[in-house]
Image (tube, rainbow, N blue to C red):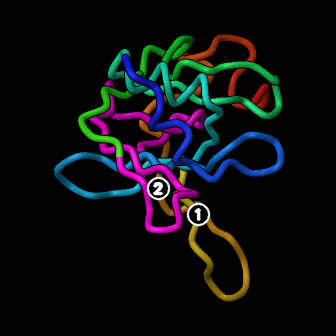
Amino acid sequence: MNVSFLDDIKWNADGLVPAIAQEAGSGKVLMVAWMNREALRLTAERGTAVYWSRSRRKLWRKGEESGHEQLVEEIRLDCDNDVILLQVVQKGGIACHTGRYSCFFQKLKAGKWQAVDAPVKDPGEIYGARGENSF
């Protein structure tokens, strides 16, 4: 695969670019993560989402532990060349490590963040004893 498209990206000082995962069809935003050159190259080659985990300092293949991988239908770049948009099919209906459909489950109400979407599945059932606290 020709990877010259990677040279068009405006990578930040850490060599990363934010990536938005949007559900194909509904247009709902599922999550935001980071990609480095290798993650974006692998995503384009394989057709499944690969991100860079800043906390673990390694490539993170979405769904590698949970089975909730993201099949990439389309990759877009914003007008400033500094944000990636992935149109994805979310396997298992869970994008968030908290066991929720989307990472955006908190809503500002009366000056406080409140969870407004319940988990689809307990994270302990997905990740074992580690649960959601290990991310």
Q: Which amino acid lies under the numbered mark 1 shown in the image of this protein?
A: Gln
Q: Is disc 2 placed on a helix, strand or loop?
A: loop
Task: Judge the density around disc 1: few (<14), some (14-19), many (≥20) Cα neighbours within 10 Å.
Answer: few
Residue 110, compared with residue 55, is above or below; it is below
The range drawn in magenta is 76-102
x then y, percent, for residue 6: 52, 36
- Could you tell me which residue is drawn at 58 percent across and 63 percent down? 106
Residue 117's disc number: 2
In the image as oriented, which residue stretches furthest toward the bottom?
110
Is residue 16 within the magenta segment?
Answer: no
Is residue 87 within the magenta segment?
Answer: yes
Residue 106's disc number: 1
- Could you tell me which residue is drawn at 75 percent across and 19 percent down? 58
x then y, percent, for residue 75: 34, 42
Q: Earlier in the sequence, mark 1 or mark 2?
A: 1
Comparing 81 with 68, the one in front is 81
Q: Are marks 1 and 2 in contact (CB under 8 Å)?
A: no
Residue 1, compared with residue 132, is above or below; it is above
Q: Which amino acid lies under the numbered mark 2 shown in the image of this protein?
A: Asp
Task: Judge the density around disc 2: few (<14), some (14-19), many (≥20) Cα neighbours within 10 Å.
Answer: some
